[in-house]
Image (cartoon, coloured by chain):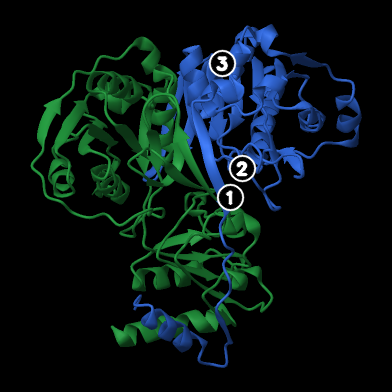
Amino acid sequence: MNIVVLVKQVPDSGADRNLRTDDNTVDRGSANNVINEMDEYAIEEALKIKEAHGGEVTILTMGPDRATESIRKALSMGPDKAVHVVDDALHGSCAVATSKVLAAALGQLNADLVLCGAESTDGRVQVMPHMIAERLGVAALTGARKLTVDGSTLTAERQTEEGYEVVTASTPAVVSVWDTINEPRYPSFKGIMAAKKKPVQTLSLGDLGVAPTEVGFDGATSTVLEHSKRPPRSGGAKVTDEGDGGVKLVEFLATEKFV
Amino acid sequence: MSEVLVVVEATREFGVKKVTLEMLTLARGLGTPSAVVLGGPGAAEALSAKLGEYGAEKIYAAESEEIDGYLVAPKATVLAELVQRVQPAAVLLASSQEGKEIAARLAVKLDNGILTDVVALAADGTATQVAFAGSTIVKSKVTRGLPLVTVRPNSLNPEPAAASPAVEQLTVSVTDTDKLAKVVDRVAEQKGSRPELTEASVVVSGGRGVGNADNFKLVEELADLLGGAVGASRAAVDSGFYPHQFQVGQTGKTVSPQLYVALGISGAIQHRAGMQTSKTIVAVNKDAEAPIFELADFGVVGDLFKVVPQAAEEIRKRK
């Protein structure tokens, strides 16, 4: 099975994150940039499928030059190769344009299965799997917490608010996964060394047949007008329980009319 | 005034979700609200009274086995046709997984911009979004097409405004490509009578400090006394204390209730990402230095196994 895993480099969600003041895009320059955590689960799932059914695992990333670090990190887990879509004109691209570029790249990779994280920690927009599936005319099974592959049939279990659903589709398909699906492996020393030699192909917009005016700020379908930091919350009263902590808690809730 | 399409989110168990009523309220400021029900045969009938109560002037009903039997693609196809026909002033969907997914396909079909996790929408289409775990407020606008936005639950207070909506049945014609992802089974998991996590006005969450799955009864008890939903931190979910669907935080649900009670939760950034826009935050933790106290409007430093039962008893006394 030819599997492509979408990997996004994001600013570390464990640190302070900002939008740039000059062009309102995500500030990647001052951030510690890492693989989007949920994507590691997609990589793990791809590797497990390859181990069980054979095939090849390719990482696909759209991002600036520095995304190379995340691509190498992803490869160190075990995928065979990577494709990096990089082009200065992509800066400022909206989700709609991003899906156009990724769909164009996937069109060249001939994937049976496209795996990705259910959302990225920076935007948390959750739209990419369906946007790509819509463009490619293939199925999208999203938010999988379990995935089984039987020949060309994919069966996924997905959490819903009322319980869970079992959904099926035939390949080719896009499947997004939650972090409940598996436990991603840590890259081994051997894996880290091997990753340095794995092929990483770079593709420009020209290679994909996408015009620069269709992406970036020129092609954006939405714009950020302004942004500001929300004032940080400040802690209020803090009492130490001296046998009446529960009562004091309820007294507070009562003054706020919750009790 | 132009129509504003509100895509109805509802559950089998509870009917119209609160976020739908919030969207109808929001839509009244932008134009004439029309509710769009996308569901199986007979879906609209059970929902129409409530939709009218909150100002839906019209209900478009697309009811078909094909809508119910496949993941969101048929819904997006029906909605795209409707949007092209009525040329609404805006399209509002819930910022749930399904709402975002329908919106995603609609955006591609119509080559239209999309804004998610919107908490306010002005008449000129300027949307307010909360980004980066609630730390950043963003004002943004769709610049191609109409305002296509998904609205975050608990963004505003739903206000009733009685209307008597006429129901228009839509013809559902979907393509084979819309029927690629088939739903073969829906399994309801027991949840009891608690409100849904993202919609609840009170959420009581437990963390690692709760210690084990059995002790979560204490969290549930307090939630029930306050009429709230139960949540859990990632540490508690990873330890197997509580199911993942109740996880609050970066890789779980984002909640924004009137009251958030954190029990035995240290307040790691992963957790804060999902709850720090709550109106009032209360915490109980034995570690006085726990970061959760930096957010809490009221904190008790103490053993939750002593504080929580006492609080529960006190609430019972006052009832």
Badge 2 local density, few (<14 within 10 Å), some, or many (20+)?
A: many
The residue pinned by badge 1 equals B250
Residue pictured at 49% horizontal, 67% vertical: B216
- Distance between the alpha carbons at the discs numbered 3 and 2: 25 Å
Residue pictured at 59% horizontal, 67% vertical: B265
Residue B35 occupies quadrant? top left
- Counting from the top left corner in percent of width and height, residue A15 is at 71, 52
Indicate which label's residue lies in the foreground, 3 or 1.
Answer: 3
The answer to whether residue A112 shows anywhere in this view is no
- Tell me if residue A241 comes above or below residue A103 in the rendering: below
- Residue B189: assigned label: none
The hue in which chain A appears in the rendered picture of the protein: blue
- Tell me if residue B176 comes above or below residue B112 in the rendering: above
Q: Are marks 3 and 1 on the same chain?
A: no
Q: Quadrant of the C terminus of chain B?
A: bottom left
What amino acid is found at the position of numbered circle 2 in the picture? Answer: Thr
Return the chain for callout 1. B
Residue pictured at 28% horizontal, 23% vertical: B83
- Distance between the alpha carbons at the discs numbered 2 and 1: 7 Å
The residue pinned by badge 2 equals A121
Return the chain for callout 2. A
Return the chain for callout 3. A
Residue pictured at 56% horizontal, 14% vertical: A151
- Distance between the alpha carbons at the discs numbered 3 and 1: 32 Å
* Number of callouts: 3
The answer to whether residue B229 shows anywhere in this view is yes
Q: Earlier in the sequence, mark 3 or mark 2?
A: 2
The hue in which chain B appears in the rendered picture of the protein: green
What amino acid is found at the position of numbered circle 3 in the picture? Answer: Glu
What amino acid is found at the position of numbered circle 1 in the picture? Answer: Gln
